[in-house]
Amino acid sequence: MKDTQKSGKSTTATKKKAEGFTDEERAAIKERVRETKAVADKADGESALLASIAAMPKPDRAMAERLHAVIKASAPALSPRTWYGMPAYAKDGKVVCFFQPAQKFKTRYATFGFNDAAQLDEGTIWPVAFALKQLTAAEEPRIGALVKKAVS
């Protein structure tokens, strides 16, 4: 009589759905893959950024357009580009700051954030992202100052 070996795996199937990325997250990842494959110079980066802004719904689009103007005026050395399909600004190829529209991940507010390439260090703790419900003239000087500090 032959000995048969049994697999250590159970033969009963589980009906548990694997947790993974949302549709919005998968779309952002695919956009990032396209961005890294593309050879982008400064002009191509800005046209991609402007196209991403133009595709946004009105509340996000208005904030992104105003942020773009403030960032360009505050730090003209930053290179506009997209990052995961979102408007972003880079120095030496590294994203310094970005705008995440509320509609991108269906959140209740947009986000203006900074990556680790930003020079915002203040002791051992400092903010790196800000929620935006609106962008008015009152917030623009603060954002401009943060962007200037980030690239200094």
Image (spheres, rainbow, N blue to C red):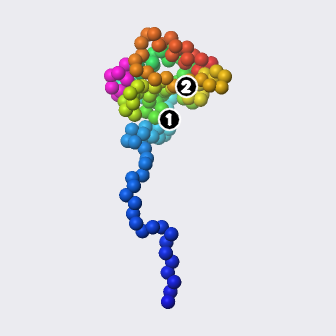
**Up-down relation of residue 33 to residue 8 (above or below):** above
Q: Which residue is depicted at the point 62% across and 18% down?
A: 152
Residue 56 magenta: yes
- Disc 1 residue type (three-letter): Val
What residue did someone put label 1 on?
39
Among numbered discs 2 and 1, the one appearing first in the sequence: 1
* Residue 70 shows up from this direction: yes
Provide residue 148's location: percent of width, then percent of height.
Answer: 57, 16
Q: Which residue lies furthest to the right in this view?
A: 123
The image quadrant of residue 121 is top right
Residue 103 magenta: no
Which portion, as a residue range, is magenta?
A: 55-62
The image quadrant of residue 100 is top left
Residue 128 marker: 2
Mark 2 secondary-structure assignment: loop
Provide residue 87's location: percent of width, then percent of height.
Answer: 45, 27
Provide residue 36's location: percent of width, then percent of height.
Answer: 50, 38
- Mostly what secondary structure, the magenta segment? helix
Residue 135 marker: none
Q: Which residue is depicted at the point 45% across and 67% down?
A: 10
- Disc 2 residue type (three-letter): Val
* Residue 27 shows up from this direction: no
State the CA–CA distance, disc 2 to disc 1: 28 Å
Q: Which residue is depicted at the point 39% across and 38% down?
A: 24
